[in-house]
Image (cartoon, coloured by chain):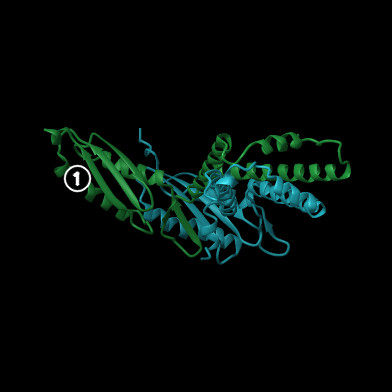
Amino acid sequence: MTRSVSAKALGRSTGTERTLTVLIGLLALLGGAAALVVGAGWLGTYRADRPLVDPIALDWLSRHALAGRVGAIVLGVLLLWLGLWWFFRSLRPEGRPDLELDDDLVVTSSAISEAVRLDAETVDGVGRARVRAVGDKENPALRITLWLVEGTDLKRVWEQLDHTVLARARESLGVDVLPTAVRIELDTTAPQRVR
Amino acid sequence: MRLFVRLLSALIGLALAAAGVLLALEVGWGWWRPGRGPLFVPWDGWRDRLAELSWSDPAVRYLAIAVAVVGLLLILAAASAGRRAIRLTDPANEVSVTTSPRSLARLVGVTVRAQDNVAGAKVTATAKKIRVRATSRLETEGELRPRLLETVSGLLDDVPLVRRPKVSVVVDSPKDRR
């Protein structure tokens, strides 16, 4: 299932990290279970009493010393590459792409964020807004977080959000479609009393 | 949980990289200078110790159980790090909207507590289900429950949710205990 750009912009994907963590977890679970099975003697009573570093295995390894050494070094380098790629992928910050409208016209992410934020905060019922650009250069999107005050009519907010705030952003940028993800926090503060 | 899995994932990556470096260096060193002993890791001592242990040794079994449990925890942590946000209807093309379960629960809680004869309420919400647990001193469950169900359902009509969660209401009232 392919998700639209705006749906992807709702939150950071942790798909790769989760998949890799599940794989390592599975490896540990299966390895531990296999060791238990061997130790319980289900693969033969004598096998359970053999040492962990088996003389038969050591003997085989010393007969294939060259292949073993080359294999171990290649494995080590592969693990290093995989581990570093994984580490930096997990920790890389989420991008804030600028919007390239034309060859020589670039709107910086902070400029568009600030403009949309000021617009969004004028909508009735929006107490606070936070806007940032997300995604990559090819598929930039906006992520808007709105904190609504208690008792706000959501349908009005919907209408105003699209017809005023986003329409203005699209118009000023000269694009037909501006992928936008909106996160709404309902009922964050009590409405201000009139004194 | 999502942040936790991200950090966990980074740590596992770092551990794999470190293991890879040590493996390649130790094997390379042993190949280049045989008989000079290990470089960083005292692997020859470990090898001798492991040669004494058998698969059925209790220490090996406990370690195997610990490794399997850690693996299970990793799987559970990764599985519970999915998106919990509740989707709302899209106001326009290429505009997606979500709200947090906590904020939906807060909205329902405020409305339920504002009802007559409700002393307090606890609300939990997911995309599939909203659970309300209300306490009342003046009304029994039979009286209050239908009213609260109707209120919450009326409230959900005003929230443009993509899928309507099921609502369950439990009323805790001292009047029922007589």
The hue in which chain B appears in the rendered picture of the protein: green
Q: Is residue A43 left or right of residue A184?
A: right
Quarter location, residue A178: bottom right
Percent x, y of residue A95: 64, 51
Question: Which quarter of the figure is the C terminus of chain A placed in?
Answer: top left
Q: Amino acid at mark 1?
A: Arg
How many numbered discs?
1
Percent x, y of residue B156: 31, 53
Most distant residue in the left direction: B178
Residue occupying image coordinates x 58% and y 52%: A23
Q: How many residues crowd around disc 1 within 10 Å: few (fewer than 14), some, or many (20 or more)?
A: many
Q: Is residue A173 left or right of residue B81?
A: right
Name the chain letter of the residue that bears numbered label 1.
B
| Above or below, comparing residue B128 to residue B113 in the picture | below
Viewer-nearest residue: A4 or A24: A24
Q: Is residue B159 left or right of residue B50?
A: left
Q: Can residue A13 be seen? A: no
Q: From the image, tell me which residue sits under label 1.
A: B145
Q: Can residue B23 be seen? A: yes
Most distant residue in the right direction: B33
Viewer-nearest residue: A1 or A137: A1
Percent x, y of residue A70: 80, 53
| Chain whose colour in the figure is cyan | A
Viewer-nearest residue: A1 or B116: A1
Q: Is residue A12 left or right of residue B15?
A: left
Percent x, y of residue A179: 55, 60
Secondary structure beneath label 1: helix
